[in-house]
Image (cartoon, grey):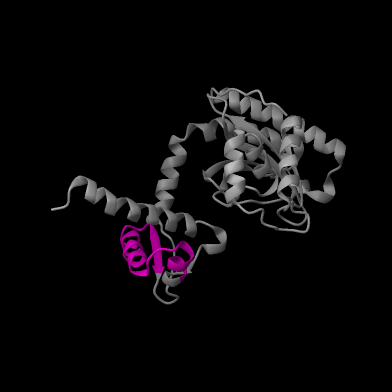
């Protein structure tokens, strides 16, 4: 008979693999994948991967299409997501501030939080819903990005403790998304200092062509960055004065959310 320690050693890797699979399938670019693709891309033994997928499918955490032989996220996750949104009060606290930012800047506003050491995810949004502003940047809740990407990635990294920021940048490559993406490490680090100086991060088409973004930090009770609030619009619609105005409004919203969550802003040396 296995001892508790032996059972834990065998069960925990399987649990970690299941989490990796669910996270992988939650990405828009990999929302439908075959067993072979999942096994290869996540470096999970194929037979182990198949057993885990079979169990997840049985419990409706993933869905299997017999015709295409591909897996995708399952229907039970909708129930879990709905329950989670009911219990996570901080999203309810943040939503009025997202709405205010959206109305004040006339841009889509979003809230992001880390889901791992190297990715940030949209957890809430507010989009314009008036006829004269029907053209706007639209986003999907649950969509996630490399932690170095766009204004929200720079904002999050800028306010991490320096040793954590250095550790992450050592592990994560500065991937080029557009011809305006910062790929030089030293230049990127300098941009983080500028973020701390201004109190907000700016991105001009660094992740998506034609899209402009501003982001400000939200802190927890210990003064650690917990989330990022950002607004997104079209790069052709902004100038330097507008950036400054939007940045100030975002900082105001970020401070309000920080206070509502019982958080506090740290003092950073620039």
Compared to residue 160, the image places residue 232 above or below, namely: below
Residue 146: % across, % down: 60, 51
Compared to residue 44, the image places residue 245 above or below, namely: above
Image quarter of residue 21:
bottom left
Q: Is residue 9 left or right of residue 149?
A: left
Compared to residue 75, the image places residue 252 above or below, namely: above
Question: Residue at position x 47%, y 40% from top?
Answer: 85
Nearest the viewer among 108 and 167 is 167
> Quick one: quadrant of the C terminus?
top right
Whether residue 126 is visible here, answered yes or no, is yes
Q: Is residue 49 left or right of residue 219?
A: left
Q: Is residue 239 left or right of residue 114?
A: right
Residue 1: % across, % down: 13, 53
Nearest the viewer among 3 and 60 is 3
Nearest the viewer among 156 and 165 is 165
Q: Is residue 46 magenta?
A: yes
Provide the residue span drawn in magenta.
Answer: 37-64
Q: Is residue 172 left or right of residue 195?
A: left
Residue at the farthest bottom position:
67
Q: Is residue 36 magenta?
A: no
Image quarter of residue 69:
bottom left
Question: Residue at position x 70%, y 58% from top?
Answer: 177
Residue 125: % across, % down: 61, 43
């Amino acid at each position: 008979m296995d001892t508790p320690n032996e059972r834990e050693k065998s069960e925990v890797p399987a649990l970690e693999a299941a989490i990796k699979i669910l996270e992988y399938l939650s990405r828009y670019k990999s929302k439908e994948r075959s067993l072979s693709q999942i096994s290869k891309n996540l470096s999970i033994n194929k037979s182990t991967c198949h057993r885990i997928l079979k169990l997840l499918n049985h419990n409706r955490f993933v869905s299997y299409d017999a015709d295409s032989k591909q897996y995708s996220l399952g229907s039970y996750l909708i129930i879990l997501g709905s329950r989670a949104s009911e219990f996570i009060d901080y999203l309810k606290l943040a939503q009025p501030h997202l709405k205010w930012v959206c109305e004040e800047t006339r841009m889509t506003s979003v809230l992001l939080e880390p889901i791992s050491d190297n990715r940030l995810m949209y957890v809430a949004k507010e989009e314009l819903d008036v006829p004269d502003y029907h053209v706007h940047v639209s986003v999907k809740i649950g969509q996630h990005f490399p932690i170095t990407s766009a204004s929200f990635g720079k904002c999050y990294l800028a306010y991490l403790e320096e040793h954590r920021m250095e550790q992450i940048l050592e592990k994560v490559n500065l991937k080029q998304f557009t011809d305006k993406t910062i790929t030089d490490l030293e230049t990127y680090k300098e941009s983080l200092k500028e973020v701390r100086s201004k109190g907000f991060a700016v991105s001009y088409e660094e992740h998506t062509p034609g899209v402009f973004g501003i982001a400000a930090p939200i802190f927890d009770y210990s003064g650690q960055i917990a989330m990022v609030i950002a607004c997104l619009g079209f790069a052709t619609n902004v100038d330097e004065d507008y950036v400054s105005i939007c940045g100030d409004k975002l900082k105001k919203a970020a401070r309000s959310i920080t206070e509502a969550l019982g958080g506090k802003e740290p003092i950073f040396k620039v």
